[in-house]
Each structure stands twice: as C-alpha cells, then as structure tokens.
Amino acid sequence: MKANAPEKKYIRYLRGEDGVFAAYSTRAGGVPSYPYSNPDVFAELRVTDRLFVWPNQIHKTGIAVVDGGLIGAAIRNGKLPGEDAASRIRAAEEAEAAGKRGEDPLFEPFLLEKDGLTGIRIPLTDGVVTDRTDVVLTSIHADCLAVYVYDPVHHAAGLCHAGWKGTLGNIAVRTLETMTEAYGTDPKDVRCAISAGIDQCCFQVGEEVVLAFRAAYPYADEYATADAEGASNCHACGDMERLAAELRAKRLGEAERPAFETPRYHMNLKGINKRQLTGAGVPSGAIEVDSHCTCCEPKLFWSY
C-alpha cells in the first residue's frame, strides 16, 4: 500500500453481477463497539436504506431463508433493546445446548436497532439466503470464512459462516441446497466466493479435528499437513506465534509452552470449502478464493 493511499475498508467479491456484490470488511472498516455497526462502510456501499439481517452464529449449520414470513415474524416480535436481545440470545443458546429446541418464541427472529441501523436478529443461525433486494445479508468473522453464493438465474444470494465446525458440517453446500429448495437454484449456474480467512500456514488443529474430517471426507488428507512440533510454518506470523506462546505460558503459569498431547496439523479450510462446492456441482472456475490470511496480516484484518 502506498504511503498516501487511503486505507482499504473492505474487499469486494462477485463483481458485476446485476448490482449484487459481496464485501468483507477490514480493520479500517470495523468499529470498536457492535460488530454489525459499520456506518461508514454501509454508507459507502449505498446500502443503508436496506434491512440488515444479523444471524447469531454458533458454529453449526443452521440456514435461515429470509423471506416475507421471516421478516413478518421479526416485526411481530418487535424491537428489543440491547440487553433484552442479549438475554434472549443467551436463553436460546442454553435451550439449544439442553436439547430443548422447538417452536418456542426464543428461536424466532426479532428486530434490533444499533447505531441507527435496524436489523433482523436470527437466533442460532450460521447461514442466510434470500431473493429479496431490500435486505443485506451479514455475518461476523475473525479467522473463519465467509462463503458467498450467488444465483444470477433466480436472483438469489446466500452467505454462511464457515469455521472448521461449519466446514465439517458442509455448511457451504447446505447453503447452496437451501437455495435450491427455496428458489430452484442449479449449482452449475452459481458464482461463489470464499473470503479472506486463516490460511493453512497458520490454522493449527489437533489430531481429533483431522480424524473428524477424515471420517466425513475421503479427500481430507489432501488439505492437512502434519506438524510434529506444533509450530507454525508461516514466516510472516512467526513473531505472532512466539508472542502467543509467551502469553499462553504466562497464563498457565509455566516457563515454557506446554507440550501437545497429540500430533498437530495445519488445515486448508479454503481448499476444503471449494472442494465441497465443486463436489456439489459448482464449476471450479466460478469459485473465487481470497488469498489473504487474516492471521498473517494483522495490520489489515482482525484475527482471533
């Protein structure tokens, strides 16, 4: 970036598709308070007159269809103030954890207003799809991936939050399948984008994660490399790795980083998501994959 160049507020994907686009905000486009409140970015993108959809992400695979019924339910449930909204979300998460999910109003969408923007808050949802032009689909990410799906034939779009748990659950394909059920989307017609996110160089997991992927996908080992020492193989974030080790040791009251009890691996989540989508019938050339690593580039992105 040139010294006098403006800060990059967001990265755009799926350009030139009937006015439909996707964007992933950077640190410059973020805000210190509510994650969904990006007034400057939304104004620059000219979408402040739309209704925002704010899913409550829980690292699972629930997909919501944003249609007149869902919007009507949110309006009927009314606008909850911030603290009431947070309490309701917590109650829904606790009920889900206890296996009590059902038709309880806890799980219904409602309206929430923050910093002048009104959004539909959807409990226990990691993906959203719509064919409406008056809404903006959103999600929150640190190192997890945003996967965007656009169907130019039926003018429908989908967005999902794909961390390793969502990727294991095939959430990108579930989003596509939901669009097929709701709008008749044909995978061969869609365009997809996989956002910036943590790359294989930095994304370290335990053996139990790799074993779970092996059980679900015969090609899993193509996207995982063993690392016997558990150290990052990324030169760009070597300093960050050492700092993390020092902080971890300090927190645990140990002089050195504790030894891992199981082998460690580095996984390529972007590659797995693309493989899942091509396996579902999306042409490889129709999938845009961002090369930015959120962990390697702390000056550009937030990272967990």
Image: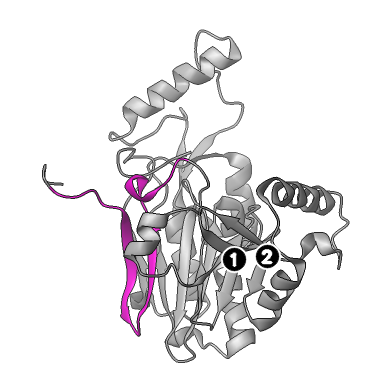
Which residue shows up at 70% across the image and 72% down it? 75
Query: Is 133 left, or right, of 7 in this rendering?
Result: right
Q: Position of residue 284 (x, y in %)?
A: 38, 75
Q: Which amino acid does label 2 sit on?
A: Gly
Query: Is 85 left, or right, of 3 in this rendering?
Result: right
Q: Which amino acid does label 1 sit on?
A: Gly
Residue under label 1: 127
Looking at this view, is 34 or 184 the one in front? 34
Q: Position of residue 278 (x, y in %)?
A: 46, 74
The residues bearing labels 2 and 1 have C-alpha atoms spaced at a distance of 6 Å
Q: Residue furthest front?
A: 116
Q: Is residue 65 magenta?
A: no
Q: How is the image coloured?
A: one colour
Q: Give the range drawn in magenta.
A: 5-32
Which residue shows up at 63% across the image and 42% down it? 208
Q: What element carries label 2?
A: loop
Q: How many badges with numbers are in the image?
A: 2
Query: Is 296 left, or right, of 52 in this rendering?
Result: left
Q: Which of marks 2 and 1 is nearer the N terminus?
A: 2
In the rendered view, tell whether residue 127 sits above or below residue 303: below
Q: Position of residue 160 (x, y in %)?
A: 54, 64
Q: Could one spot residue 64 in this view of the protein?
A: yes
Q: In which quarter of the image is residue 152?
A: bottom left
Q: Position of residue 207 (x, y in %)?
A: 59, 40
Mark 1 packing: few (<14 Cα in 10 Å), some, or many (20+)?
many
Residue under label 2: 62
Q: Quadrant of residue 3?
A: top left
Q: In which quarter of the image is residue 80?
A: bottom right
Looking at this view, is 227 or 184 the one in front? 184
Q: Is residue 16 magenta?
A: yes
Q: Could one spot residue 218 in this view of the protein?
A: no
Which residue shows up at 33% across the image and 59% down it? 290
